[in-house]
Image: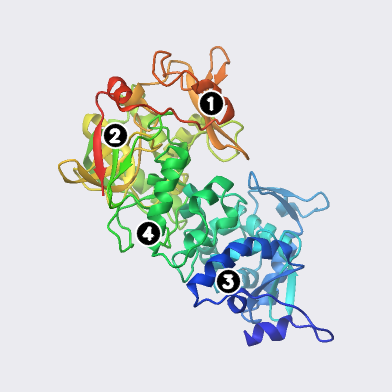
Amino acid sequence: MKNILRCLRYADKPRIIWIDALCINQNDDVEKGPQVARMGDIYPSAHRISIWLGREENDSTRALNSMLWIGSKVTVDWVRFTVALRPECVEPSFQDIDKGIPLRPEDTEAIFHLLSRRWFERLWIRQEVLPAKTTAVVQCGLYQIPWPPFRRALACIYQKPRTWTPFDDKLNKRLLSLRGHIIQSSIVPLAYVRASFGQSDCKDPRDRIYALLEFLPEKDRAVVSSPDYTKDVEVIFRDIVWRHIKHYGSLDLLSQCQINSKLATDISWTPDWTKKEFIYGRSYWRGFASSQFGEMCTISEDGRVLRTPGASITTVEDLKDISTIDGNHPNEQVQETLRMLVPNDKLNKRYVTGVSMLEAFIRTFVVNALSENQEPWSGFDPALEEAQEIILNALKVMRAMLGDRKLMRGTDGYIGTVPQPTQNGDEVCVLLGCHTPMVLRRVKDDIFRIVGECYVLGISEGEALLGPLPDGTRRLFASDPKSGVQSYFLNSRTGHTGLMDPRLQKSFPGLEDFPERLGEDPNAKIQLTPEQLHSIFPQMREFDII
C-alpha cells in the first residue's frame, strides 16, 4: 500500500483516492454486504480508475510500450470479438490476421512477465475495469498508459500469431488462462459464470458470486439477492440455484455441476463456483435436450434432495481418455487422439440417428458447434464440410470442446463426450427442463448424484423425447441483448422460420398460449401438470438427486 500511495499521489496538490481494501471493513460481515452492493455505483462515478500492477520491474515499461504500440494499430468489435486494422495503420503484419505480430524476443518476455502479475488473476478487478472505458490507466511504478489500447492489444495478441520466441509457448498458455478476462462481456448470466470467471482468484468464496453482481442480467441479480456475508457459502449457492430454477422454470443451471466439487456440502446439484479452473469453449447454451418444456421439480423439506422427472436414455459402456491438446505440437497431438478414438473400420458404418459414423464423430468432436446452426454467423464455427476437412487433416479445432473430457460409448450405439469423472455404468439422462443431457451416478434405487453435463449425438437436440426434427428443418440459435441466446427453427424447403419446436404437436396440452408467450420471451417454457407429463412422456420417472 505504501508503494501504491507514493506512486499515485500528486506532487503539488491533494488527491482523493478510494481503495476498497481500506474503505470497506473486510472483517465485518454485516457491514461488508451493503458496501459490496454499492461498488457497482462507486466505480462508474470515479473520475479515473488506476490499475496498479505493481513496481516497475521485469522490463515492465518495455511491455507497456509494446502493448500501447499494438493497441494503437487495431480496433476490436467486443461483441463479435473480431480484430480489425485501424484506418491509419499501414503496418503490413497487422493487415492479415494470419500474419505474426513482429515482436522481438525481449518484447515477448516482457509482456509475459507483465501478464503474469497477480492483478490479472483477481476476480474483483473484473468489475472495477468494466465501467472504466476511456478513464482507466494501467500503471507500473510511475509509468502508465491508457487502458483502452492495452485491452485492444490483449485481444490482438490473443487472436493473432506472433513471431516465435523462446517465451512464446509460455505467453500462449498465459493468454489461454486469461481468456475470460480478455473476452469480457458486459453481461454474463449465472450459467456462464464458471466459464467466464473460473480462472480468477478471490479470498472469500462468496465473492465468486457477489463480486460479479454488476455483470449479471437484472433477472439474475434478483435471483442472487443482496450480498449477505453472514451466511455459509454452501447455503448461499444452494439458495441461488433453487431460486434460479423457480424463476426461469428451468434446470439449465445443473449443467454447471460436476461431481468433484470441493464444497463442504455433499449436494451434487449445486454448482461449485469456488473452483478455480479453466473451461475453454464448452457450449452449454447450445443444448436442447428437453426441447421447450419447463422444469417440474420439487425440493425436500431439509433442502437437500432435488426431485425431478427424467428419462434414462443410455448407459455408459466404454470410455476413452482424450489426449491433452495444449498448443505444443497440436497436429501430432490431434492425430494421436484421432487414431485412438476413431478406428478406421467404424467410419463407413451408420450411426443410430442414420447419419454416417464420420459425420457423427465430427459433430461430437465439435459439440455440434457448426456455422449451419448459427444466424448470423459469428465467424468462428466451421461448416460441416469444413469441419470434416479439418478433422480428416488432423488439425487442432478440437481443443476447445474436448478439454478435460472423455469419449463415451453407450448402449444402443450412442457416442458422446462426457466429464472426466464419468465411469462405466453411469447413466446419460434427460431431466425435464434441463437443456443438456446429464451424466448421473446411481447411489441406490432412484437416488442419484450428478456427474456432469455431456454432449451425446441423438440426445442433445431433444430426440430422446420428441424424435428427430422433420426433414429439411434445422434448429438455429441467435442472441439479442434482451433475451440472450435463443433457438429458432428454419424450414430450408419453404424458408419459413419459427420460434416453436415443430415437433410439438398442436394436440399437446399447455400449448394454447405458448406461441404468444414465445413472441414475448423466446426462451419461454411449457409448464405441464403431472397428469399431462405422464400422458405425453410415459417413459419418464422421478429422479431423486442428492
Horizontal relation, residue 272 to residue 133: left or right: left
Q: Tags 3 and 2 in contact by the CB under 8 Å rule?
A: no
Vertical position of residue 408 compared to residue 532: above or below: below
Discs 3/2, front: 2
Among the 4 quarters of the image, the one containing residue 255: top left
Q: Tell me if residue 382 comes above or below residue 212 in the rendering.
A: above
Report the front residue among 67 and 313.
Answer: 313
Amino acid on which the number 4 mark rests in the picture? Val
> Which residue matches tag 2?
309
The residue lying toward the viewer, choosing from 245 and 164, is 245
Q: Is residue 352 left or right of residue 189?
A: left
Labels 4 and 1: the sequence-earlier one: 4
Residue 402 or 311: which is nearer the viewer?
Answer: 311
The label nearer to you, 4 versus 2, is 4
Mark identifier at residue 119: 3
Disc 3 residue type? Trp
Tell which circle, 4 or 3, labels the residue nearer the N-terminal end.
3
Q: Position of residue 523 (x, y in %)?
A: 51, 33
Which residue is disc 4 drawn over?
Answer: 235
The residue labelled by disc 1 is: 517
Q: Are marks 4 and 3 in contact (CB under 8 Å)?
A: no
Q: Dot 3 surroundings within 10 Å: few (below 14), some, or many (20 or more)?
A: some
Q: Do the residues bearing badges 1 and 3 touch, measured as CB atoms within 8 Å?
A: no
What residue is at 54 percent from the left and 26 percent from the top?
Answer: 518
Query: Is 398 situated left or right of 519 in this image?
Result: left
Does the rendering let one see residue 154?
yes
Q: Find the distance from the CA under tag 1 to the CA under tag 3.
A: 45 Å
Amino acid type shown at disc 1: Arg
